[in-house]
Amino acid sequence: MKALEGIKVLDFTHVQSGPTCTQILAWFGADVIKVERPGVGDATRKQLVDKPGADSLYFTMLNHNKRSIELDSKNETGKRVLTRLIEECDVLVENFAPGALDRMGFSWERIQEINPGIIMASIKGFGPGKYQDCKVYENVAQCAGGSASTTGFLDGPPLVTGAQIGDSGTGLHLCLGIVTALFQREKSGRGQRVSAAMQDGVLNLCRVKLRDQQRLEAGPLREYSQFGEGIPFDDAVPRAGNDSGGGQPGRILKCKGWETDNNAYTYFIIQAAVWEKVCDVIGEPDWKTREGFATPPERLDKLNQIFERIEQWTMTKDKFEVMDICNPLNIPVGPILSMKEIAEDEGLYATGTLVRVPHPERGEYISVGCPIKLSDSEVKVERSPLLGEHTRQILTDVLGFSGGELDDVIASGAVGEVK
Ligand code: CAO
């Protein structure tokens, strides 16, 4: 028994944001039916191709545990099949450009007419307002949601992050909205519309910077390095390099080998509660009681000096030794792990955080497993579907087409099947 067993999801998503959401629903046991344009499919199937002829990693890593039907939703027979799918499904998820679903003839009003119990979930770049009609990709959302302006160094340009907070982040937000709507439907019997805008999702993840924007009105942000360096604050939250976003100062520091290894670094947090242990570890025991160093507020204008001294110590150890020494003392540190180190960490495969997935076209590849573990709903990661792999199965098992009717649908050109 899986948590979402029995729930049918009509997956009209593409690229990254929507597919992340429906992949989680599939991992939790929903039957996710991915609708793709005949002969073309999700654009990511053929983007960033590493093995010619095979679905890309971009596609395979976002579409596990789903079924694929090739269906032309602009063709009359295709519209009939789509209408039947809407009747059968509990949830419809889409992340088309604004207005695309209406242009197909499937407005929210029409979808409700077809199935009043359906939950229709959408991702768009922006919510209602002046930008509502824009097409949006990851980095646009990072810029519009406040992430880029607050990421990077003070003397450099805004930076986007490697974490896909606009796409995968919004997919997670939408997923939560869908399961909440399913829960409400248990009591109300009604479906509803669930919307998540990528700008809103990014901003939600950047809330500490909105916090700091308001704190600026009360004076300089004393925990930012800039304060200790005597650089005046502007009227907007500045980029703060690798400063900690919370109340405990932290930095990325060099470790042994940094001259040749780009990732020989550790994050080091001087949490107030373990200050004395930090002083002992780095060989500055008198900082425990010395005036100007003994309490957190006194230290704020000396963070550069303090972290430079800690770095002299971390540079004598490799990043894992720093972890081994500091962890037992409750000093929060973390090695900067490369993707290579992560991909080679067998411990992550043991927990299902990483998985090795066999695939008929590409052979075995590595992917992330479900990051949310339910004790009563185990996730088994299954490979992504080939384009149109389940077209016939969905027409017959889900929609009940058979005999001449099935032949007519297939002959109409509205659907396609795996080659
Ligand atoms: N049968 C027939 N037509 C189909 C179809 C199917 N099965 N599936 C899609 N189409 C059509 C759509 O109806 C649309 O046609 P119209 O433009 O004539 O209405 C067309 O394919 C293209 O859809 P699109 O505009 O959504 O795709 P795009 O590649 O031009 O834009 C994106 C992509 C992501 C910018 C846009 O979909 C978008 O802004 N989505 C919302 C925000 C979002 O999720 N962004 C994150 C993407 S991940 O980085």
Image (cartoon, rainbow, N blue to C red):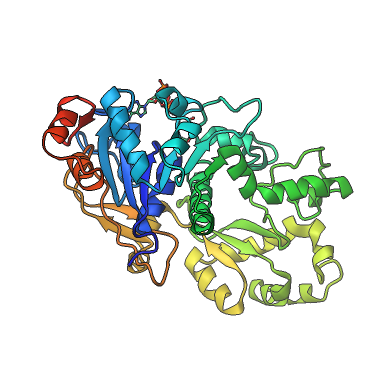
Q: Residue at x 19, y 34 (%)?
A: 53
Q: Quadrant of the N terminus?
A: bottom left
**Total marks placed:** 0
The image position of residue 416, as x and y in percent, is 20, 31
Q: Residue at x 49, y 47 (%)?
A: 191
Residue 72 appears anywhere in the view: no
The image position of residue 127, as x and y in percent, is 61, 34
Q: Residue at x 19, y 40 (%)?
A: 401
User: Up-down: is 273 above or below 198?
Assistant: below
Q: Nearer the viewer, residue 30 or 408?
A: 408
Q: Is residue 93 left or right of residue 71?
A: right
Q: Identify the image quadrant of residue 103.
A: top left
Q: Identify the image quadrant of residue 142.
A: top right
Q: Quadrant of ligand 1?
A: top left
Q: Quadrant of the C terminus?
A: top left
User: Up-down: is 303 above or below 193?
Assistant: below
The image position of residue 152, as x and y in percent, is 63, 42
The image position of residue 331, as x and y in percent, is 62, 72
User: Up-down: is 131 above or below 186?
Assistant: above
Q: Nearer the viewer, residue 293 or 78?
A: 78
Q: Is residue 81 left or right of residue 321?
A: left
Residue closest to the far bottom: 328
Q: Nearer the viewer, residue 179 or 342?
A: 179
Q: Is residue 416 left or right of residue 96?
A: left
Q: Residue at x 17, y 36 (%)?
A: 418
Residue 349 appears anywhere in the view: yes
